[in-house]
Image (tube, grey):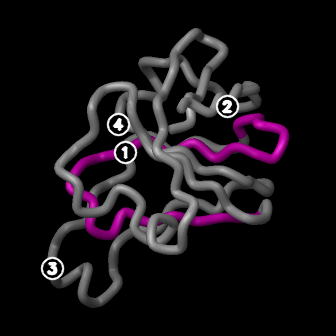
């Protein structure tokens, strides 16, 4: 678990997506997330990473973070995509890419960005929780 700390004092306990399977599926097929929990995608390289919500059953907020841990892009309320036809035909929405390279993408419950007063340019702190 990686604890992501925001300048507002908010904290998010994020499961690390660091395998090909987790990077592909993210939070897909889960029923929901407890408050202040999420997932952080740890990409090997910085880039214009896009994510999708295929198989998601709930809305999520998305936060793109660069190598120096500054927020470069935000998306509130990314739509879930669980309809069989959309999933079968890969018609689920993609989000991103950010306007500049990102190394990490954080997924949290919809409403987290507003509740935690998250803003572009803010510097985050990542702490490994054992």
Q: Between 117 and 55, which is closer to the camera in this rendering? A: 55
Q: Earlier in the sequence, mark 3 or mark 1?
A: 1
Q: Are marks 2 and 1 in contact (CB under 8 Å)?
A: no
**Label 1 crowding class (10 Å Cα cut-off): few <14, some 14-19, many 20+?**
many
Residue at the location (79% across, 54% down)? Answer: 100
Q: Which residue is tagged 2? A: 126
Tag 1 near tag 4, CB within 8 Å: yes
The residue lying toward the viewer, choosing from 101 and 23, is 23
Q: Residues within 10 Å of mark 2 (few under 14, many from 20)?
A: some
What residue lies at 42% left-to-right and 28% top-to-bottom?
112
Task: Indicate the secondary structure of the residue bearing disc 1.
Answer: strand
Mark 1 and mark 4 lie on one chain; the one further toward the N terminus is 1
Disc number at residue 84?
A: 3
Residue contact at pointers 3 and 1, CB within 8 angstroms: no
| SS majority, magenta | loop
Q: Which mark is residue 110?
A: 4
Discs 2/4, front: 2
**Marks 2/4: CA–CA distance:** 21 Å
Residue denoted by label 1: 60
Mark 3–mark 4 Cα distance, whole angstroms, equals: 23 Å
């Amino acid at each position: 678990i990686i604890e992501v700390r925001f300048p507002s004092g908010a904290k998010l306990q994020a499961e690390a997506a660091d395998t090909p399977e987790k990077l592909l599926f993210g939070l897909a097929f889960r029923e929901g997330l407890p408050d202040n929990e999420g997932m952080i995608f740890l990409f090997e390289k910085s880039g214009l990473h896009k994510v999708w919500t295929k198989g998601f059953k709930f809305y999520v907020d998305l936060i793109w973070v660069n190598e120096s841990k500054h927020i470069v892009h935000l998306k509130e309320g990314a739509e879930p995509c669980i309809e069989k036809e959309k999933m079968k035909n890969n018609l689920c929405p993609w989000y991103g890419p950010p306007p500049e390279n990102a190394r990490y993408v954080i997924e949290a419950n919809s409403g987290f960005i507003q509740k935690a007063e998250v803003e572009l340019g803010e510097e985050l702190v990542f702490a490994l929780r054992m």
